[in-house]
Amino acid sequence: MPESAVEKRLAAMLGQRLATLREARGLTQEQVAHAAGISRNHYQLLESGWSVRKTKAPANPRLRTLIALSEVLGTTLPDLFVDEMPR
């Protein structure tokens, strides 16, 4: 099934939020990935908003990955999205 425009937009927004939070804490992608229990490549893809680099399919991380990232980045799970979601 083709990805929707909303799915692509949300994946890109999540990636931007992850990068902003990581940079604000002075962490590298590798440090965040290691602390969250995922590979650096997986984290790089999430920040880019992709799940597959070749096809540029939008990122669709597991809930446990999002929870781990929120803990590493010192935020809550909803705060990964709250600033990015249209009202």
Image: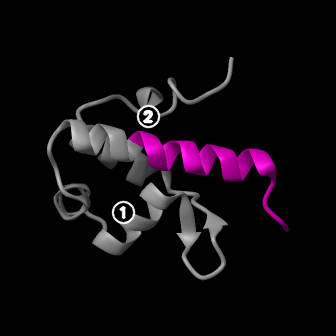
Q: In this picture, is 9 found above or below 37?
A: above
Specify start and end residues of the magenta stretch as a single range.
1-17
Q: Looking at the magenta stretch, what is its main secondary structure? A: helix
Quarter that holds the N terminus: bottom right
Assess whether residue 62 is covered by the magenta stretch.
no
Going by the numbered disc 2, the residue's amino acid type is: Leu
The residue lying at 67 percent from left, 46 percent from top is 9
Indicate whether 12 appears above or below 86.
below
Amino acid carrying mark 1 in the image = Tyr
Q: Position of residue 64 (x, y in %)?
A: 41, 51
Q: Residue furthest bottom?
A: 54
Q: Which residue is mark 2?
A: 80
Residue name at image x 47 percent, y 50 percent: 15
Dot 2 falls on a residue whose secondary structure is helix
Q: Position of residue 18 (x, y in %)?
A: 38, 45
Report which residue position mark 1 lands on.
Answer: 43
Spatial separation of the CA atoms under disc 2 and disc 1: 14 Å
